[in-house]
């Protein structure tokens, strides 16, 4: 029997699973965002004042105990008219996506998404199976319903659809989502409603009656709690049970759990923020039209714009003015496209002013924009 020496151990190269080597990497900036952040579709203002009031009351002893998720899941279930076993709170929708892939995908299973979309679907799915199928939108960036439906096979086990979608802002009707769920009874359909509040249409009311439907919501966007990392998945109790089984019992921190009921209760604040976004969205669309920049309809808190070959220059010129945008050029079908987040009035005003100056600086003319449309 041979034993490993210290030298053997030093030269041995530990390898992860093949899927980990092959999976794509998501590289959002993890530093250097000290500016007006119109790059990540966050709430640009703050959460409800009730959240701050609750934060003041938290004690240091509270930090020593493991967080208790269940009482807050009860409050959330009541708020949304669901049973507690139909609700799982997660460490953001990011974790929910990860749990979905872990719970429902074996190697060889197929999963289906429509691209361009939120990159974390690709990351989490590719970790579990090489069977990820992507249906690409055409230049309208609208959801290709017929082609998507045709891509479902008996091997499809997980389908994820974001409505509104990121980065396009396009929506998928409830009717189409229910048709997808019905066409794939062997699969779980996760409808990612991270941006639901800026649109208003939901499939949450179909939870319970559609057995293979799971709806995800985040508290990172309209509620302004991105830093606390909290989201939820709701669906059939049996399916949610599988997700609960693969999640850590302490996946959501106690600060997030303490403030979530306050955020949920303050509907006036939520509605105020949504109205700010609706008004700001119109202002940005109008400004971009005047500037001759091609855009796509958005039901969300961001707008995708076609800057063509000058996309990098625009992002740099905006950064110089203290405003961050997200270059989406590497997303499939998005060459030259840049995304701008819509926030509260003051930030929209600053964003539009910076856009006007930056486009002028990079030599953009309305004629150039119209020529691309
Ligand atoms: C479509 C979509 N889903 C989920 C998320 C992640 O949400 P969370 O902050 O809850 O992890 C994002 C974040 O940008 C998103 O765009």
Image (spheres, helix red, strand yellow):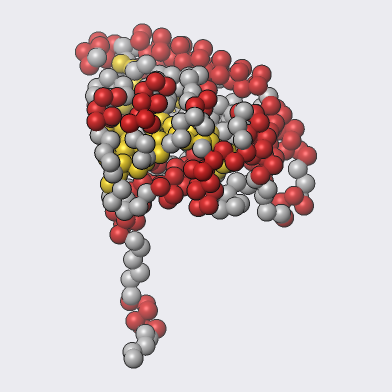
Q: Is residue 237 above or below residue 9?
A: above
Above or below for 7 versus 223: below
Question: Which of the two residues, 112 or 31, is positioned nearer the viewer here?
Answer: 112
Up-down relation of residue 100 to residue 12 (above or below): above
Q: Is residue 338 left or right of residue 81?
A: left
| Residue at figure coordinates x 65%, y 21% from the top left | 267
- Given residues 305 and 124, the one toward you in this image is 124
In which quadrant of the rendered image does the N terminus lie? Answer: bottom left
Residue 183: % across, % down: 33, 31
Q: Residue 110: x percent and y percent?
A: 30, 44
Estimate the x, y position of residue 25 in percent, counting from the top left: 35, 48
Q: Image point 68% across, 53% down: which residue?
A: 66
The mark total stands at: 0
Q: On the image, which quarter does residue 344 sit in?
A: top right
Which is nearer the eye, 238 or 23?
Answer: 238
> Could you say where residue 151 lies in the image, as x and y percent from the top left?
25, 34
* Residue 36 appears in view: no
In the rendered view, does 155 fall on the left or right side of 256? Answer: left
Residue at image location 44% in from the left, 44% down from the top: 100
| Front residue (pair 300, 345) | 300
Most distant residue in the left direction: 371
In which quadrant is the C terminus drawn? top left
Query: Residue at horizontal 28%, vertical 44%?
Result: 155
Is residue 154 visible from the viewing direction of this image? yes
């Amino acid at each position: 029997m041979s034993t490993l020496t210290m030298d053997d151990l030093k030269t041995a190269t530990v390898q992860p699973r093949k899927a980990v080597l092959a999976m794509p990497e998501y590289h959002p900036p993890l530093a250097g965002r000290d500016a007006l952040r119109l790059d990540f579709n966050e709430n640009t203002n703050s959460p409800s004042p009730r959240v701050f009031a609750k934060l003041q009351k938290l004690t240091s002893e509270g930090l020593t105990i493991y967080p208790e998720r269940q009482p807050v899941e009860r409050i959330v279930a009541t708020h949304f008219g669901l049973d507690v076993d139909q609700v799982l709170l997660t460490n953001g929708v990011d974790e929910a996506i990860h749990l979905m892939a872990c719970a429902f995908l074996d190697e060889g299973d197929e999963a289906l998404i429509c691209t361009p979309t939120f990159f974390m679907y690709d990351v989490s799915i590719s970790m579990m199976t090489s069977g990820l199928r992507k249906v690409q939108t055409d230049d309208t960036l609208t959801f290709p319903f017929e082609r998507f439906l045709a891509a479902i096979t008996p091997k499809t086990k997980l389908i994820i659809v974001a409505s509104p979608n990121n980065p396009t802002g396009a929506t998928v009707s409830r009717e189409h989502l229910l048709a997808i769920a019905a066409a794939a009874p062997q699969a779980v359909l996760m409808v990612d409603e991270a941006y639901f509040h800026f649109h208003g249409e939901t499939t949450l009311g179909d939870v319970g009656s559609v057995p293979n439907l799971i709806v995800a919501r985040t508290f990172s966007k309209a509620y302004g709690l991105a830093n606390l990392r909290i989201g939820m998945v709701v669906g059939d109790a049996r399916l949610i049970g599988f997700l609960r089984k693969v999640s850590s019992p302490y996946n959501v921190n106690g600060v997030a759990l303490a403030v979530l009921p306050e955020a949920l209760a303050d509907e006036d604040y939520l509605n105020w923020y949504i109205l700010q976004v609706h008004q700001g969205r119109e202002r940005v669309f109008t400004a971009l039209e005047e500037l001759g920049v091609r855009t796509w309809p958005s039901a969300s808190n961001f707008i995708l714009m076609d800057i063509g070959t000058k996309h990098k220059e625009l992002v740099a010129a905006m950064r110089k003015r203290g405003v961050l945008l997200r270059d989406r050029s590497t997303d499939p079908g998005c060459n030259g496209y840049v995304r701008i987040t819509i926030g509260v009035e003051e930030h929209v005003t600053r964003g539009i002013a910076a856009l006007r100056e930056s486009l002028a600086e990079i030599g953009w003319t309305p004629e150039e924009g119209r020529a691309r449309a």
